[in-house]
Image (cartoon, rainbow, N blue to C red):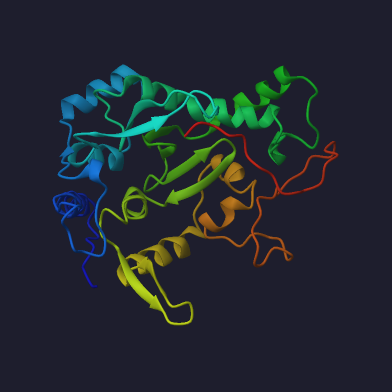
Amino acid sequence: MSLKIPENYTEFLYWVKERTEKFWSINPETSENDFICEKWVYSAKWIGLSDSEIDSIEKKYEIKFSYEHREFLKILHSIDRKEIIEYTVTFDEDAEIKLGYRPFFYNWLKDNDEIRDRLNWPYRTIFDDVVGANKVWLKSWGKTRPNSDEEKESLFSKWFNQAPKVIPIKGHRFVVNDVTDAPVLSIYGSDIIVYGWNIRHYLLNELKEHLNLLELVYDEEEDEWYSEPIKEFQEINNFEYKKAKDKAIPVWEEMILYWSSGWSSYGKEYPNPNNDTIRPILKTFVPEDEEDENSQKTFNPFEK
């Protein structure tokens, strides 16, 4: 498979629109293609916003979209449906199964509750990792941790308010404002990785299945087929992560590199000679008063 992925950002957004809608236009129940869309997204269409609508949203939520994010909202923004999901309030075997709706990308005209929750998500979930079981403590906050949660939050709030603002785009993905090229972070408590070094790079990663950027490859040794990124997509990934080694995301970078999970997303090698093949989630910095070792952690089970 070979194709030309546009380099011009605006052209690229229109390319995403055309390519995804074409992929979604093929009925998954009758298609004979190797890759098909899920039933819920069949025949979906993107819904763009006008400049005046974007201006009203900025005023309503007291935020400011970056140029790249604004262009995304004008051309793509969201789609005309949500995924229906089943869930239970408890884990009991006889728990009632309920139905919910999950937005593909946030609809800034309709998803008010979800968006307000996500705007608070980074502060709330990262601070939960500061005072909770993960005992997160950045080197810049001092060599030792205060005893009280109030003192911890005072230092944390000062750090957080210095960081570039992050604005939700999908799930727990956030666009970083006031940073060149508007990188996109996946923020899951203190476990933060770079999901894309700009919105173009992010959309390729997020929508790779919908953009049909995977191809089937046969593994003779394992006698099975598996999917892998097509050449053009992989070349863009390699190019972006090669450039990333010389980039910086102010303030956020320290938190991204706090856990080993963030290093490869930043295009950097995790500085642990004993961690060449297996990558458990390990701390980069341990304060002097920390008794437990730099051992593997399991993150708080935040709701996705």
Total residue callouts: 0
Q: Is residue 245 left or right of residue 42?
A: right
In the displayed structure, 64 sits above or below 205; it is above
Point 73% across, 66% down: residue:
273
Query: 29 and 193: which one is in front?
Result: 29
Q: Is residue 63 left or right of residue 137?
A: left
Residue farthest along the front direction in this orientation? 94
Point 48% across, 58% down: residue:
244
Residue 205 lies, in percent from the top left, at 37, 54
Residue farthest along the bottom direction in this orientation? 220
Residue 14 lies, in percent from the top left, at 16, 50
Point 64% across, 48% down: residue:
259
Q: Is residue 161 visible?
A: no
Query: 125 and 180: which one is in front?
Result: 125
Residue 220 lies, in percent from the top left, at 43, 82
Point 77% across, 48% down: residue:
294
In the displayed structure, 185 sits above or below 5; it is above
Image quadrant of residue 76?
Answer: top left
Q: Is residue 227 visible?
A: yes
In the displayed structure, 96 sits above or below 167; it is above
- State which quarter of the image contains the N terminus: bottom left
In the displayed structure, 295 sits above or below 291; it is below
Q: Is residue 152 left or right of residue 1?
A: right
Residue 41 lies, in percent from the top left, at 23, 43
